[in-house]
Image (cartoon, rainbow, N blue to C red):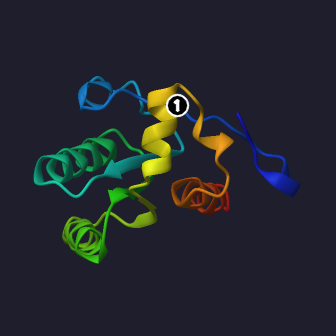
Amino acid sequence: MLDTGENRRAVTVLDMEAGLEHLSRGTARHVDTLVITLEPYFKALETARRCAALGREIGITRIVGVANKTRDEDDRAAIREYAARHDLPLAGDIPFDDVIRKAEQAGRPPIDHPDAPAVRAIAALTAVLTSR
């Protein structure tokens, strides 16, 4: 559950297993927003495109992408261009962040590092996703 600030709307975030099964079975048909992660690799981009298409098929009306683990402007441009070609609006960009990798290895939550670039990007994404 996320605290969305002044409007105090309850928001539930469900991190589903990567892949298409939950969409092909229709188990996600009642969600308000489908957030699809796009990493700068062709296979990941193709999976994101297929997720968006399945989301549309089952009637999800708000589908957005999030660029993830971007290392440089080439990564961001590749994701932006791919998303634009497939009518998938991007809601944010979470950069590759070695602080997060090290926290994961240590079993520590990313939120323990509020100044890390990825954590700041996630906070900004939260604001975008809860603004409607």
Extreme-right residue of the structure:
6
Instruction: Residue at the far left: name it.
Output: 42
- Residue 46 as seen in the image, left or right of residue 112: left
**102 or 69, nearer to the observer:** 102
Residue 59 drawn at (x, y percent)? 38, 43
State the image quarter where residue 81 is shown: bottom left
Q: Look at 25% across and 48% down and name the residue there.
A: 48
Total number of numbered labels? 1
Instruction: Identify the residue at horizontal 19%, vertical 44% (top origin).
Output: 47
Residue 30 in view here:
no
The answer to whether residue 92 is seen in the rendering is yes
Foreground residue among 52 and 120: 120
Q: Residues within 10 Å of mark 1 (few under 14, many from 20)?
A: few
Q: In this figure, which residue is indicated by the disc labeled 1?
A: 14
Residue 29, image x and y in percent? 42, 33
Q: Quadrant of the C terminus?
A: bottom right
In this orientation, which residue lies closer to the viewer: 70 or 97? Answer: 97
**Residue 33 location, x and y as percent?**
50, 47
Picture layout, residue 107 above or below residue 71: above
66 over 11 or under it: above or below = below
SS at mark 1 in the image? loop
Front residue of 33 and 128: 128
How far across and down, in percent of the image, does residue 28 sit? 42, 31
Please state if 83 lies on the left or on the right of 119 as rendered.
left
Quadrant assignment for the N terminus = top right
Give, as a three-letter code, the residue at label 1.
Leu
Q: Is residue 28 above or below residue 110?
A: above
Q: Which residue is pictured at 53% across the width and 25% down the height?
A: 107
- Above or below, comparing residue 27 to residue 29 in the picture: above
